[in-house]
Image (tube, rainbow, N blue to C red):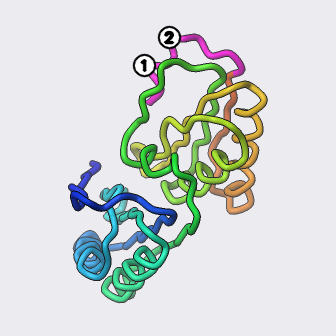
Amino acid sequence: MVDKLPAKADALPGPALGFIETASIARGVLALDALLKRARVEVLLTTVAPRGKYLILFGGGVAEVEEALKAGLETAGHSVVDHFLIPNVHPQLPAAIKARVKVPGIEAVGLIETRDVASAVYAADAAVKAAKVTLIEARHQPGGKGLVVLTGAVGDVRAAVAAGVATVKSDGMLIADVVIPLADPGVLPHLV
């Protein structure tokens, strides 16, 4: 179940992303409240993951995200399972986290499937920075997995997928990576 919380009306994602994963849903919601009270950030995603974990992904300016992350971590305490900060995040990433990005058509399609959403976010950022591609999605999927979907010219998609895979493969977080060189247009409505 994915809960998208309303963003503050004038908050825009900036050059940073923060992520907190807690082992407790209640502690996760408490951390969410604390980080929103501490700094002006936009919540991009909250969700309950398998085994009662709670995930929070938020964006904003680097200083604001750092301050919000600090508040969330302090509040969540020992229930924190994982956390990260990505400064200088690619501008396409926040929209692909919040929802599937509408594209007019597809050329080659690349997919990177990971064991969790945090790994998918890292892979998506690396992929879109490595080549001229359009990020369609970088989100949480059923079963707690993460999925990155992107499109572009074949060579660019291959380079982007390779860069994304390189960020998660050594951690054992990669489930699969696929490049469809010339995707049939009928695939577009079914890309997750």
**Residue positioned 44% across, 30% down in the render:** 192
Quarter residue 37 falls in: bottom left
Which label sits on residue 189?
1
Q: Position of residue 139 (x, y in %)?
A: 45, 46
The question of residue 40 being in magenta is answered with no
147 up-or-down from 29: above or below = above
Rendered residue at 29%/77% (across/down): 31
Q: Is residue 33 above or below residue 105?
A: below
Question: Residue at the location (50% across, 48% down)?
Answer: 146
Residue 34 vs 5, above or below: the answer is below
The amino acid type of the residue labelled 1 equals: Pro
42 lies left or right of 120: left
Q: Position of residue 46 (x, y in %)?
A: 31, 59
Q: Which stretch is magenta?
A: 181-192
Residue type, label 2: Gly
Few, some or many residues within 10 Å of mark 1 (<14, 14–19, 20+): few
Residue at image x 44%, y 21%?
190
**What is the number of the mark on residue 15?**
none
Q: Is residue 74 left or right of residue 178?
A: left
Splitting the image into 4 quarters, where does residue 88 fall?
Answer: bottom right
Q: Nearer the viewer, residue 147 or 143?
A: 147
The image quadrant of residue 177 is top right
**120 to 150, vertically: above or below:** below
Q: Considering the numbered disc 1 on the image, is that residue within a helix, a strand or a loop?
A: helix
Residue 186, numbered circle: 2
